[in-house]
Amino acid sequence: MVLHITTLALAHISTAALRTPRAVDSPRVSVAMGFDAGGAAIAIRDLDVWAGSSQLIESVDWSIMPNERWSLLGSNGCGKSTLLRSIAAAAAEGAGGELSNHIQVKPKLRFGMLEQTAVSGSDKSVRDEVMSRMGPYQAAKAALQAAEE
């Protein structure tokens, strides 16, 4: 299975409140030192994640610059949620934790992750749930467009 990382310009998903991350298998740490994130809001270098003897993620390198929007696409079980939980765990543990050797998250960065199963009792689609949090950004976009006219 292959994890594809592609850009997405439809929704700004990095503004929801950070939820408490679930436990993630620790990545295999090969270098016990941090790295230069180069101004990225989130930077990942040579990340491996294992579940028992199964490697879920292998050697992922990925940088997300401020204000970029991304979507993770891939088949079931390829590691999309595992990668996002790894990022959330790195953000929660902060600098100096085991994950900080492979994942650096800009301080005070806020991001959200919608679970794959409905836990709120809502019958909204994932798109509707995401768009329900977009009001301030849609209003700002409309004001900017009006000012440009």
Image (spheres, rainbow, N blue to C red):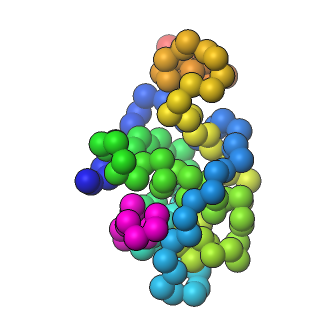
Side of 139 relative to 11 (left or right): right
Q: Main secondary structure of the magenta part?
A: strand
Which quadrant of the figure has residue 14? top right
User: How far across and down, in percent of the image, does residue 115 sit?
Assistant: 55, 35
Relative vertical location of residue 48 with respect to residue 66 in this rendering, above or below: below
Query: Residue 92: x, y in percent?
Result: 71, 58
Specify whether 110 is left or right of 10: right
Find the magenta span and give its range: 48-61
Q: Position of residue 132 (x, y in %)?
A: 61, 18
Q: Residue at x 48, y 47 (%)?
A: 81
In the displayed image of the protein, which residue is found farthest to the front? Answer: 52
Is residue 129 located in the magenta-colored stretch of the structure?
A: no
**Foreground residue among 39 and 109:** 109
| Residue 26 visible in the picture | yes
When the figure is inspected, residue 90 is found, relative to residue 96, above or below; the finding is above
Residue at position x 68%, y 74% in the image: 97
